[in-house]
Image (cartoon, rainbow, N blue to C red):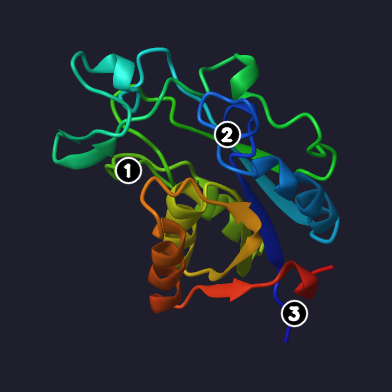
């Protein structure tokens, strides 16, 4: 029996989510050295990039009268409103400068459609299109995915949920993530939600 082929998925470790970024996730920079150590242990490494047009639907600025933090309905999908972030070709959209690039096998770009947000690395929030990641992983013989990055209760969580739905044995290394925690305890709730569907909450030490 062949051993499992494990892929590392690095979610949105971009300047706008790190120190002094437009949508800074507290202590985000601290995970970069750990992710660098992890990625050289995997033969398949995926890095996702949040990439938005200037008028993206997730921006509070795109909805006159709305504020950052508001939740609105977009064609039946609940949308949290954020500051303008990860605008295509901007510095904020680039991967963190200290993140290694050479071990990355492929990049998945998401969030390009101005009309729908895309938390997951696999599909958009309205489930109207997918990134092709599941098929790409399967074509490489990947059976297991290990997920790290930003932010725990949004893009990391939804990537993990979709990975399970796509049939991958899924682990999230919480120590190599950070949470926004718009509401106190959002990170704890996200971990519990993932556990309930069979996602393993692992330790980076298991892979180093």
Q: Residues within 10 Å of mark 1 (few under 14, many from 20)?
A: some
> Which residue is found at the position 31% from the left and 34% from the top?
69
Q: Quadrant of residue 182?
A: top left
User: Does label 1 or label 2 sit earlier along the sequence?
Assistant: 2
Q: Nearer the viewer, residue 116 or 84?
A: 84
Question: Which residue matches tag 2?
Answer: 17
Q: Which mark is residue 3?
A: 3
Q: Secondary structure at mark 1?
A: loop
Q: CA distance from mark 1 to mark 2?
A: 19 Å
> Which residue is found at the position 20% from the left and 13% from the top?
64
Quadrant housing the C terminus? bottom right
Expressed as whole percent of the image width and height from the top left, the position of residue 202 reads 64, 73
> Which residue is found at the position 42% from the left and 54% from the top?
158
Q: CA distance from mark 2 to mark 3?
A: 35 Å
Question: Which residue matches tag 1?
Answer: 125
Q: Secondary structure at mark 3?
A: loop
Residue 166 versus residue 16 in the image, above or below: below
Tell me, yes or no, if residue 58 can be seen here. Answer: yes
């Amino acid at each position: 029996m062949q051993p499992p082929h494990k892929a590392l998925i690095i979610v949105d470790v971009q300047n706008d989510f790190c120190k002094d970024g437009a949508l800074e996730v507290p202590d985000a920079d601290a995970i970069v050295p750990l992710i660098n150590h992890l990625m050289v242990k995997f033969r398949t490494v995926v890095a996702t990039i949040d990439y938005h047009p200037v008028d993206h639907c997730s921006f509070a600025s795109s909805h006159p009268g709305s504020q950052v933090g508001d939740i609105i309905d977009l064609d039946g999908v609940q949308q949290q409103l954020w500051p303008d972030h990860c605008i295509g070709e901007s510095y904020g959209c680039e991967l963190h400068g200290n993140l290694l690039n050479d071990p990355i096998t492929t990049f998945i770009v998401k969030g390009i459609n101005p009309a729908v947000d895309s938390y997951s690395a696999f599909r958009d929030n309205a489930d109207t299109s997918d990134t092709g990641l599941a098929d790409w992983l399967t074509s490489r013989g990947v059976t297991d995915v290990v997920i790290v990055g930003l932010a725990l209760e949004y893009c990391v969580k939804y990537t993990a949920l979709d990975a399970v739905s796509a049939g991958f044995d899924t682990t999230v290394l919480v120590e190599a993530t950070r949470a926004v925690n718009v509401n106190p305890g959002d990170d704890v709730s996200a971990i519990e939600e993932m556990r309930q569907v069979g996602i393993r909450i692992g330790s980076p030490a298991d892979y180093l």
